[in-house]
Amino acid sequence: MSLYKTKLPDSAPTLEMRMNIPSRAALVAPGQQRSIWAIGGGKGGIGKTLLTSNMAVYLSWLNKKIVVVDMDLGGANLHTSLGVESPTKTLADLVIGRVDDMKDLMQPTPIKNLFLISGAHDPVGITNLRHMQKARLLRKFREIEADFVLLDLGAGTATNTLDFFLLADKKIVIVTPEPTSIENAYRFIKSSFYRMLRSATPSPYVRQLIEQAMDMKNTRGIRTPKDLLNEVKRLSPSDGLELQQKMEEFEISLVVNQVRVKSEADIGKSILMVCERYFGMGVEYMGYLPYDNAVWQSIRRRVPFLIDAPNCSAVTHLESIIRNLLRATTRAAAAK
Amino acid sequence: MARRSEETYYDVLKVDQRGTIAEIVAAYHSAKNAFSKDSVATYSLFSTEEAHEIIAKLDEAYHVLSNIDRKRAYDEDLKRRREEAADASMPMAAPNADGSPGAAHSPRPSSISHNGKESYQDLSPKGNFQALPTYDKFHGDTWKEIREKRGFSVDEVARITKIPSRAVIAIEAEDLRSLPARVYLQGFLRNLASVYRIEAKDAMTSYLKRIDELTQGKPS
């Protein structure tokens, strides 16, 4: 039974007009079936699930087929955020082998076009996926039939989390304007960046350097990806050029949550500046969600704020964020 | 923290060279805000010393680019340096004879310093510079005369231009055995002409012709 008290629209034609939605062909690269967006951030309680659930609802209103996957293994609660009853089949069933097809895990939600693959009530130990299990999951994600697949990642920088983040076409990092959140976000960004470089680099010598760089106390004095690039360039110019190309291809989309004053919204620009200057990586600032009482109240009611409080200030900002993400997705698809 | 030695002031502020003063001011405030000691966005990444160093660079870049006169002078200097760097045969891209980096390696104009004594304002004709007589030939003693008329000692010129003082002395004395290689000499002369605010092309051509004649043993 749905927790929603209001009648939901099948779609939102006014939104379509407002958003000037790109066609499906424009959103995905040729030969690609879907666009995968991963939402991570390093720290818990910063709004990853909130952003995922509301983005999913919004995109489904744009007549897109959406599948949200709760990748917070061991701490899954996306179903609660969407107001869905406890699911019967979860990711663990696929991991264990009880289910072979992702379709069997896709649970309908009260919202048309929106499906959930939950991780709720998964057995203890699901967080420690073995390599083969992870490889199977990554492969299965690519097989999901949908326009958008949204991955709600867990906190921390565990390699599993980073690998699911790196799988995505759009890598979204969310932060709140608090030192702890920002510190963890940098760590998350750097860790995923090094992980990407390490798996994309054929040279064992460069891989060794990357592993050293991942240790912040390394004796080579490598503290940032840019330091790493300079070191590789110094020791092996050809490997350095290859690494530089990989670095230039890597891009993060940033969202700031719980913004109370304008200076907090500017933190997004500051993080962008730091990443560009000192990490040598591209970051796009997609926008911010303001702190709004309606948001936490909607969480209490277990209904996305988009439905629970459609006139709250956060909705306008969510629209802006999604518009920016769609534009960036369209650009990336066109570039492929 | 790795630093890029070739950074220009525009790189420091991340603004386009054709940007307006308003854009420069906005970029400066945005960057200063990001790297201030109270910034939650950077406190965990940089030590106090590193943050001070970054802020000092921002201040220095802003000091020059936020003033139309200083910006214009900097742009001219930058243009000249880029032209010199583009010319592979030019000595400015090579280290100086004393082993220090050539002037082309420094994004800062040789005569500009935020905290130092010299600045473009000091060196401009509007400052202490007086009109020079017209010279037909630029021999060693001509260069010396111009330097003295401009009120520079050899050491001051060496400090501003990063040219070794022994090279300045050799140029003025037409000391063939102590003169640097021709490619270096061309760069030194261009640099000196820039500081003395004289037409570099005529002065260089005349002096190099003189040196050629002395080398061949038939001075005019």
Image (tube, helix red, strand yellow):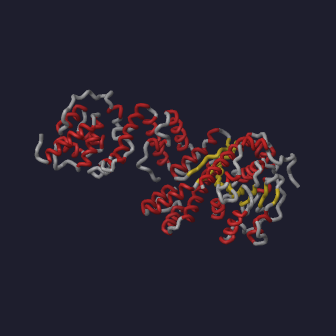
Along the horizontal axis of the image, is B26 left or right of A125? left
Along the horizontal axis of the image, is A319 left or right of B133? right
Question: Residue A297, how many percent across, how many down?
Answer: 79, 45
Residue farthest along the left direction in this orientation: B218
Question: Residue B39, how many percent across, how many down?
Answer: 57, 44
Along the horizontal axis of the image, is A5 left or right of A318? right
Near-viewer residue (B212 or A7): B212
Is residue B57 depicted above or below A101 in this figure?
above
Is residue B194 depicted above or below B180 in this figure?
above
Is residue A276 depicted above or below B193 in this figure?
below
Residue A15 visible in the snapshot:
yes
Q: Check the picture and name the quadrant holding the C terminus of chain B.
A: top left
Near-viewer residue (B32 or A6): A6
Which residue is pictured at 54% across the width and 58% down the height?
A: A246
Near-viewer residue (A37 or B111): A37
Which residue is pictured at 73% across the width and 42% down the height?
A: A314
